[in-house]
């Protein structure tokens, strides 16, 4: 199991790669609901009440620019 810890004060959008099918999708760092891969339905993120517990691999942190 791959756990990525993201320490940030601001919420960000993250590009996350599924560890099962390698699909990449954009998710919110402070997700309030469970996020599943759109292709294989593996859980990519679990809500924790703050920053989500990311289960996939974070490929990129997206900025406002």
Image: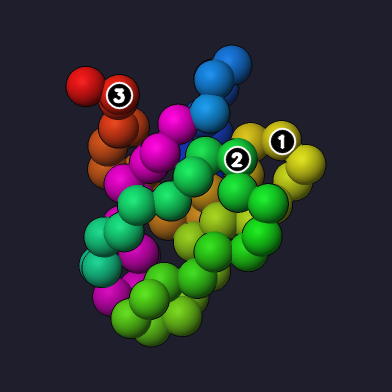
Q: Sequence order check: which comes first, mark 2 or mark 1? A: 2
Residue corresponding to mark 1: 50
Q: How many marks?
A: 3
Distance from the alpha carbon under mark 1 to that under mark 3:
21 Å
> Who's the residue at 53% across and 49% down the image?
54
Residue corresponding to mark 3: 64
The image shows residue 31, relative to residue 20, as above or below, that is above
Residue 25: x and y, percent?
A: 31, 59
Distance from the alpha carbon under mark 3 to that under mark 2:
16 Å
Q: Sequence order check: which comes first, mark 3 or mark 2? A: 2
Label 1 or label 3, whichever lies nearer to me, is: 3
The image shows residue 49, relative to residue 27, as above or below, that is above
Quarter location, residue 65: top left
Residue corresponding to mark 2: 30
Distance from the alpha carbon under mark 2 to that under mark 1:
6 Å
Q: Can residue 59 be seen in this view?
A: yes
Helix, strand or loop under label 3: loop
Residue 37 counted in the magenta span: no
- Asked whether disc 2 touches disc 1, contact meaning CB atoms under 8 Å apart, the reply is yes
Helix, strand or loop under label 1: loop
Give the magenta part as a residue range. Answer: 12-21
Circle 1: is it few (<14), some (14-19), or many (20+) Cα within 10 Å? few
Q: Sequence order check: which comes first, mark 1 or mark 3? A: 1
> Who's the residue at 54% across and 64% down the image?
35
């Amino acid at each position: 199991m791959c756990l990525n810890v993201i320490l940030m004060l601001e919420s960000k959008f993250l590009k996350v790669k599924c560890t099962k099918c390698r699909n990449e999708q954009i998710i919110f760092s402070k997700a309030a609901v469970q996020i599943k891969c759109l292709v294989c339905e593996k859980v990519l993120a679990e809500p924790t009440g703050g920053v989500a517990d990311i289960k996939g691999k974070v490929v990129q942190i997206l900025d406002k620019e």
